[in-house]
Image (cartoon, coloured by chain):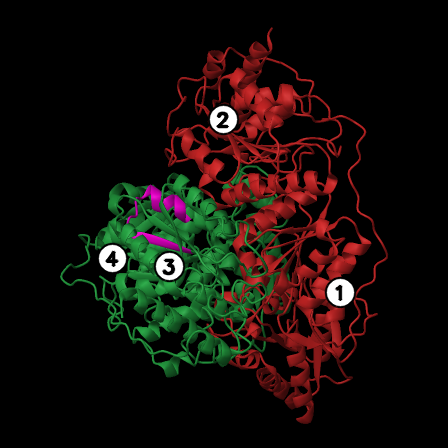
Chain colours: A red, B green
């Protein structure tokens, strides 16, 4: 059998197996798999370098299915490569199976979860950055994209960055099968609409017939030989190729075939071709950066420093101690202070310009290779990347995000720049950690802790300089809190975090003058939250808590505290202070007051609660 | 004075006024304003058609500052046009001023808030769609863009859609001043990198010197004369133009000038040129669509229908009754059932392909002209547009979103397709309404109500068919709830919504067999929430509530219920059931069980709570 015949047969096998697996629960995307079968057959048999038995081999190529719904094709490839058995293939989409509807890293050969379109290519950019700039290994990143998903702007962020960074190790393959979920794409089979856009963005582009295995072979060879820029292969294909009942027909997206047996017969029946996937060459080890001792910045008690500044300084120190730490920023590094890291560790800093989706995607890609990314922007602009953060959790990714300029306390810039929904957004991410420090030394400790956290962690920083209230040697655990002020007979407890901690302390001073003793809790770990300390406060105060946050009332600190008491038989009375109203510009103090979260409002809320307690005691 | 001299003088005035206004609080973006001053001077004096005294005139052109940080320039234009006084100009960024740090519609001439980059152009696409397809009026949409913001993928979604729709009434002006916030852009002054990309996307592109008023004039004339496609003017400019201390220098982004007096002197001093902005031609009225009677779909009690289907059918009916209602969808209209509307009202349906950011932005643009957009996608994919939703609230926009396929109950597709953070995300939007119906008739009523809601409203629908439990004539208010089952002596109350309502009813049946009487509340209005009904339930059951939702535990129904009791002296004991763990594929029932939110888990949680109550009663 010639190579061409073999590839054609393998392509048919991948189609047949895509149909068979989708028949198991009568769901899945066989037609979207069939269009790309020939493209993947040639890749698997000749170009991919991958040690199936050692998915963690740093020299392995990476194969990302940006069109994650073509999972039947991916799993059929795994079967052909001997990674999974035919028996397991036929567990597709069953409860408990590793072969989920869309790929996730529950499978050791899957780097990242896909299935939200427009994410695989930006993530692949991150993996390619790791290969070129960090690991410095010759692995290639192959990415199968759908034509429909090029409508996502995130794809063009990826095109832009890959070309700008000269990622010659990245190849995108666009499966132009013309048909989206509900009809034809904007560009149908106009291959030039894709090649011209890609070329304008600086890529090498090759248009081919995606069912001509010879053309596919030549295109991959050309991609491998292309230097200084990434390559995109724009392949004209037929959705449902090979089965006349569905080939190039609308209405069959995301549907198992009605008559799998007849379809399989039309494709020439089942086959059992096994591919011995070429292993990567041995020898080269991934590059590692030199490390030194961890010397976190130390801020003097009573001085003032912005937590965003402490973030930049601490991250720089953590970067000295841990060579795996890398940083990214979305063109605001002089505001987030990621620029301090960039200056100290230029080889481990990546400027992502104003492209927050690509920034988070790149972070996800970098952690595929065990780098430890910290990505920063204004808290409000991280909302731009929420789908990527959500999917990062499905990817079981370990990434660290920092949102600066949180809350109304930013001052004059106005509401477009105020992060007021970031706590809600980040708390509602599976397994996430949400931290919100109030002073520089605390920030430094938490940044250091984040480097070793699993999952999605988020640090919220503040624009303004705030008083240093903790000594440099104090330790802060994730999941902890700090009772900043308390007495034997507290009447009320104020639960604050970040910018509201100094306000709460000021309120406590005012309350003391009225004879009201207020406990102040710095709840810097919003998730996980320190339930024990909250319970103790409720007990000590007769169940009188005030929460105060520079955030909308929904989903933030107040609700986190309420949720901590969910299920309690005697939950405390909780007064939730949060930002009221859409504010405009102003001085930070004016805005904190207008929002109803400054010391005065805290004291007033505490007084109301304490009156009840006092009444009971008298 | 020749036109050219006049424009040059006006440009200098705009620079001077940008410096003056930024000096008030010593904050703002004068240098980013100065680069675009000549571009805007010519536009204001010769091309813009706008009745300053009648901002609601439907024939007015629209001017969108996509680079919202150039607000000093915008406000200086308003002063030159006589819209605001010089006195008001000098309130820039002060607390209480309409002249906020970034433009918002607090000012009657501002259509939408900008300041999150990459949003103005996609919104302008929406306004241009309104002009071409709905109003059918010859107004033009002019959009001033920054060069930095072209890094946002959303800009390319806008480029794609504007060309695809042939929006010849749209002109984008890119102010290529080379310098972003923290350094040079990717492309510096390489104008061709912009024109080639725009041309590849199907636009007419013109590269000019952005300080040559003659070239600017010719470019606008050419844009007006270009038919069948939008035009982009790519203008090479100098940031801080005209003031040697800052001109084309890094480090001056977002900073007031150090020496405003000297800078103003260098620019030739203050001027007071007044522009009589050309008014639009009178006569033409906006197109209006024919309307009929509202006949909502009616579903028979005991039948089954998916709420997503009811959304599509109800929206179609609402579209008959209200000619201002329009629909958009992100290439999943056969899943969200927006396709029913598309078939019935093709002139009022806009296919946005897989570009959720552009979809929401277009909705915001359409409502600028008082159209009533409903935009739909899978709930999970609306996370893609969170920054646009957040900013829509700052825009005081009235838009309606529908997220289908919420929760683990979608079944086999797996976690990438499960909307599990949408309630948290949408609740944390200022002034939002969050609705989550459980049956077809309820859905229909809520869709009808949404058409007249202000602000951001969100409807969460379910993939699976669910039992119709309400008669077609029942009415449902926003802010209400429904006690679906209750007795004189309820031991516990289950608060459910959407897919968990039938589960709660099943649990109540099981509990009744154990002699436990469970009240079931359908909390379809998650925000605003029906506090009275919740309080009554707490009182009736001795404070024993179970909440159950197909959503992560954070920020959803459970926390909304807890928040409803914030401040209560005796808050109830609330058991919160929500999705536990990152699930894979499976049948809906398998996943509801695995998530811990099916009838069995509800009954178990209720039993635990009721035991306490029962013990007390005995």
Q: Secondary structure beneath disc 3?
A: loop
Instruction: Give the chain letter at badge 2.
Output: A
Q: B515 and B128: which one is in front?
A: B128
Chain under callout 1:
A
Q: Quadrant for the C terminus of chain A, please.
A: bottom right
Ranked by sequence position, the earlier of labels 3 and 4 is: 4
Magenta residues span B158-174
Q: Can you tell which of label 3 and label 1 is closer to the viewer?
A: 3
Residue at horizontal 42%, vertical 79%? B97
Q: Quadrant of the N terminus of chain A?
A: top right
Kindly indicate whether the residue at mark 2 contacts the one at mark 3 (C-beta within 8 angstroms).
no
- In this rendering, position of residue A243 left or right of residue B179: left
Give the image location of residue B54, x and y in percent. 24, 71
Q: Is residue A416 above or below residue A279?
A: below
Query: Same chain for marks 3 and 1?
Result: no
- Residue density around tag 4, few if under 14, some if 14–19, many if 20 or more, within 10 Å: many
Q: Which residue is mark 2?
A: A30
Residue located beneath label 4 in the image: B139
Position of residue A344 measured from the top left corner of the image (x, y, whole percent): 74, 57
**Residue at screen point 41% across, 21% down:** A247
Q: Which quadrant of the figure has residue A445?
A: bottom right
In depth, the one of B501 and B20 nearer the eye is: B20
């Amino acid at each position: 059998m010639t190579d061409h015949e073999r590839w054609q047969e393998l392509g048919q096998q991948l189609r047949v197996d895509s149909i068979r697996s989708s028949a198991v629960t009568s769901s899945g995307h066989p037609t979207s798999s069939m269009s790309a079968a020939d493209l993947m057959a040639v890749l698997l048999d000749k170009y991919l370098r991958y040690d199936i038995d050692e998915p963690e081999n740093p020299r392995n190529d990476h194969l990302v299915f940006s069109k994650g719904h073509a999972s039947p094709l991916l799993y059929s490839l795994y079967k052909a490569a001997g990674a999974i058995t035919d028996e397991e293939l036929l567990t597709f989409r069953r409860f408990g199976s590793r072969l989920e509807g869309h790929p996730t890293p529950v499978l050791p050969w899957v780097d990242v979860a896909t299935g939200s379109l427009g994410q695989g290519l930006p993530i692949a950019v991150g993996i390619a950055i790791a290969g070129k700039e960090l690991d410095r290994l010759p692995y290639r990143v192959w990415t199968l994209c759908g034509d429909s998903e090029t409508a996502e702007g995130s794809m063009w962020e990826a095109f832009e960055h890959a070309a700008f960074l000269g990622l010659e190790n990245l190849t995108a393959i666009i499966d132009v099968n013309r048909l989206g979920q509900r009809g034809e794409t904007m560009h149908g089979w106009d291959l030039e609409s894709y090649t011209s856009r890609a070329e304008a963005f600086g890529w090498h582009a090759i248009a081919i017939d995606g069912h001509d295995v010879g053309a596919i072979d030549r295109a991959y060879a050309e991609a491998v030989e292309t230097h200084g820029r990434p390559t995109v292969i724009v392949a004209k294909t037929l959705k449902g190729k090979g089965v006349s009942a569905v080939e190039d027909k609308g209405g069959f997206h995301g549907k198992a075939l009605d008559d799998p047996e007849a379809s399989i017969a039309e494709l020439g029946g089942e086959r059992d071709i096994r591919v011995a996937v070429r292993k990567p060459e041995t020898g080269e080890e991934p590059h590692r950066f030199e490390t030194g001792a961890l010397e976190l910045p130390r801020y003097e008690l009573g001085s003032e420093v912005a937590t965003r500044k402490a973030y930049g300084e601490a991250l720089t120190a953590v970067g000295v101690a841990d060579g795996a730490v890398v940083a990214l920023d979305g063109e605001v590094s002089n505001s987030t202070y990621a620029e301090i890291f960039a200056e100290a560790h230029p080889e481990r800093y990546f400027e992502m310009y104003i492209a927050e989706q690509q920034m988070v995607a790149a972070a996800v890609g970098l952690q595929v290779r065990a780098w430890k990314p910290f990505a920063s922007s204004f808290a409000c602009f991280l909302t731009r990347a929420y789908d990527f953060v959500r999917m990062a959790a499905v990817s079981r990714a370990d990434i660290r995000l920092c949102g600066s300029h949180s809350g109304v306390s930013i001052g004059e810039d106005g509401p477009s720049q105020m992060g007021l929904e970031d706590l809600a957004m980040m708390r509602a991410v599976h397994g996430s950690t949400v931290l919100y420090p109030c002073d520089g030394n605390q920030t430094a400790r938490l940044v250091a802790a984040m480097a070793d956290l699993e999952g999605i962690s988020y640090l919220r920083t503040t624009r303004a300089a705030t008083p240093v209230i903790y000594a440099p040697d104090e330790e802060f655990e994730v999941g902890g809190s700090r009772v900043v002020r308390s007495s034997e007979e507290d009447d009320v407890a104020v639960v604050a975090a970040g910018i509201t901690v100094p306000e709460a302390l000021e309120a406590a001073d005012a309350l003391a003058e009225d004879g009201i003793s207020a406990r102040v809790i710095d709840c810097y770990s919003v998730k996980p939250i320190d339930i024990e300390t909250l319970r103790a406060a409720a007990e000590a105060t007769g169940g009188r808590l005030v929460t105060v946050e520079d955030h909308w009332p929904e989903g933030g600190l107040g609700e986190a505290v309420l949720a901590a008491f969910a299920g309690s038989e005697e939950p405390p009375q909780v007064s939730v202070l949060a930002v009221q109203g859409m504010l405009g510009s102003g001085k930070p103090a004016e805005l904190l007051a207008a929002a109803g979260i400054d010391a005065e409002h805290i004291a007033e809320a505490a007084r109301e609660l304490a009156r009840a307690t006092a009444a009971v005691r008298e």
